[in-house]
Image (tube, grey):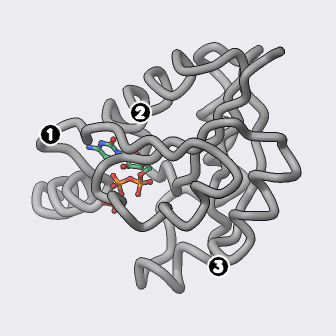
Amino acid sequence: MARTVITFGTFDVFHVGHLRVIERAAALGDRLVVGVSADELNLRKKGREPVFSQAERPRDRRRPQARRRGLRRESLELKRDYIVQFGADVLVMGDDWTGRFDEFRDICEVVYLPRTPAISTTALIEKISATS
Ligand code: CTP
């Protein structure tokens, strides 16, 4: 049976760290579902408006390996519902989240992948702000 992988994130100012986590997550199954955080959730959790709105961010994600991927917005509180709704066998997150998704081990595998070093949306925003 096809193995479904799910991952969640904001994926704002899309960078190589995002690409690598998506590629490695996709390699763990046959289908990857990427939950893209809504603007309001990002504001609440990270204290800033995303640079690219929720309408713009999923579009970026569609380019690589589009056939394997479903795209949905997510709300942090609803992760369990999304795992069930999309029939996910594996939940993948970067290891900055280690331990924080263990509560879902009762319904799927939970895998934390090493973050790509030295890059983040926050660092990119700071770098661009400093040079403009
Ligand atoms: N990620 C990663 N390597 C990075 C940056 C992010 O593997 N260098 C992963 C995160 O662990 C997460 C996903 O990409 O699973 C989405 O992360 P997100 O929070 O959207 O990106 P960040 O660059 O970490 O954003 P911020 O700086 O706003 O926290």
Circle 2: is it few (<14), some (14-19), or many (20+) Cα within 10 Å?
Answer: many
Residue 76: assigned label? none
- Residue at the disc numbered 2: 21
Local crowd at mark 1 within 10 Å, few (<14), some, or many (≥20)?
few
Q: Residue at position x 51%, y 28% from top?
A: 25
Vertical position of residue 57 compared to residue 98: above or below: above
Q: Earlier in the sequence, mark 1 or mark 2?
A: 2
Q: Kindly identify the amino acid type of the residue bearing the numbered disc 2.
A: Val
- Residue 60 placement, left or right of 14: right
* Mark 2 or 3, nearer chain start: 2
Q: CA distance from mark 2 to mark 3?
A: 23 Å
Residue 81 at x, y = what percent? Answer: 81, 63
Q: Secondary structure at mark 2?
A: helix
For image coordinates 24% across by 52% down, the residue present is: 124
Mark 1 CB in 8 Å range of ligand 1?
Answer: yes
Residue 106 is situated, as x and y percent measured from the top left of the image, at 65, 57
Disc 1 from disc 2: Cα separation: 12 Å
Q: Is the residue indicated by label 2 positioned so its CB lies within 8 Å of ligand 1?
A: yes
| Quadrant assignment for the C terminus | bottom left
Q: Nearer the viewer, residue 10 or 53?
A: 10
CB of mark 3 within 8 Å of CB of mark 1?
A: no
How crowded pointer 3 is (Cα within 10 Å; few <14, some 14-19, many 20+) is rated as some
In this rendering, position of residue 1 left or right of residue 130: right
Depth order, front residue of 5/103: 103
- The residue identified by callout 1 is 117
Question: Residue drawn 64% across and 79% down?
Answer: 40
